[in-house]
């Protein structure tokens, strides 16, 4: 079987998979669409123990109501329970999803709308089809076509992403500065040890920050970046800037947050320019 035969098989299998996935989504029968999605409320927040693992998130007790039966459930996030809860306060609403009729199989989600249509795998299959077409075009017609095949969609994605990123960066910094600072403190440092594929031991430290907003909300949160020498940060006093309507968005370094967001925009511009350069270079080589 030659290149074109492999391409036909590749596109046929993945195309069938994508069509089935899109059809199931249109019919509303994907697992993501059938899942029950409700909003729970944190009733109690546990204080992380210094030196313990941070892999399971902050311990919380959550209540939610099953809309099918009206029964209320009180649950915890012990064990494998979906997204890790890294910021918590009493009264915070959090997303919960579970299969129809099985509320005991609940999973926490920090983004209840994510994956609601169940199109992740079909979209990935279409992407793989495109990759196959670009590779075969490069082999049949010459490698400059791969530059065009890479550069054009990369440029379109960058042009779509960048304006929103600029707006979000400006709005985020303004919102963090709008509420006024409050004092905070590192109440614990969590420690996780793992062995990588080379047999080396890797240790990570996660400071846990506690602060109370101007509105009286007591927040406990992981701070995975932005603190100097995190392993020895327990007991350190901090100044916290947070978004008044959502304390989960906070920073211990407002200037550093601005630099970080500016760096992300600069990276996005550079990525966009790479796509433009690849597409233009490919077009020149093909025309020449």
Image (cartoon, rainbow, N blue to C red):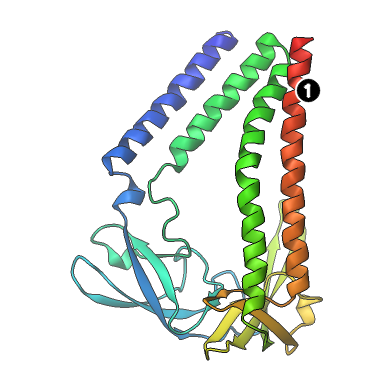
282 sits left or right of 171 in the view: right
The part of the image, by quadrant, that contains residue 155 is top right
284 sits left or right of 43 in the view: right
Name above or below for residue 162 compared with residue 212.
above
Q: How many marks?
A: 1
Name above or below for residue 104 compared with residue 280.
below
Residue occupying the far left of the picture: 69
Horizontal and vertical percent position of residue 68: 20, 65
Question: Residue shown at 56%/25% (left/top)?
Answer: 130
Horizontal and vertical percent position of residue 56: 54, 71
Question: Residue shown at 59%/11% (left/top)?
Answer: 3
Horizontal and vertical percent position of residue 284: 78, 17
Q: Secondary structure at mark 1?
A: helix
Horizontal and vertical percent position of residue 278: 75, 28
Crowding at mark 1 (Cα within 10 Å: few <14, some 14-19, many 20+):
some
The part of the image, by quadrant, that contains residue 1 is top right
- Camera sees residue 65: yes
87 sits left or right of 27 in the view: right
Q: Which residue is mark 1?
A: 281
Is residue 92 or residue 195 the one in the foreground?
92
- Camera sees residue 51: no
Question: Residue shown at 55%/73% (left/top)?
Answer: 57
Name above or below for residue 179 compared with residue 204.
below
- The image quadrant where one finds the C terminus is top right
Question: Residue shown at 48%/21% (left/top)?
Answer: 11
């Amino acid at each position: 079987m030659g290149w074109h035969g492999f391409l036909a098989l590749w596109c046929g299998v993945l195309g069938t998979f994508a069509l089935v996935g899109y059809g199931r989504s249109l019919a509303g029968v994907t697992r993501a669409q059938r899942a029950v999605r409700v909003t729970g409320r944190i009733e109690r927040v546990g204080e992380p123990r210094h030196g313990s693992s941070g892999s399971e998130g902050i311990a919380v007790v959550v209540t939610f109501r099953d809309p099918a039966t009206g029964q209320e459930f009180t649950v915890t996030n012990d064990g494998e329970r979906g997204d890790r809860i890294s910021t918590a306060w009493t009264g915070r609403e959090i997303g919960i999803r579970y299969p129809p009729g099985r509320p005991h199989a609940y999973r926490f989600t920090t983004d209840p709308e994510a994956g609601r249509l169940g199109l992740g795998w079909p979209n990935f299959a279409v992407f793989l089809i495109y990759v196959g077409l670009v590779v075969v075009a490069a082999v049949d017609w010459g490698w400059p076509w791969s530059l065009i095949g890479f550069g054009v969609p990369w440029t379109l994605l960058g042009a779509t992403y960048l304006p929103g990123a600029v707006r979000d960066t400006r709005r985020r910094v303004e919102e963090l500065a709008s509420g006024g600072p409050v004092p905070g403190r590192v109440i614990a440092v969590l420690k996780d040890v793992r062995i990588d594929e080379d047999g080396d031991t890797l240790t990570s430290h996660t400071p846990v920050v506690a602060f109370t907003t101007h509105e009286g909300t007591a927040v406990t949160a992981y701070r995975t970046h932005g603190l100097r020498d995190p392993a020895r940060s327990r007991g350190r006093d901090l100044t916290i800037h947070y978004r008044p309507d959502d304390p989960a968005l906070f920073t211990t370094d407002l200037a550093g947050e601005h630099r970080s967001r500016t760096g992300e925009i600069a990276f996005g511009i550079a990525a966009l320019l790479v796509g433009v350069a690849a597409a233009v270079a490919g077009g020149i080589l093909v025309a020449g």
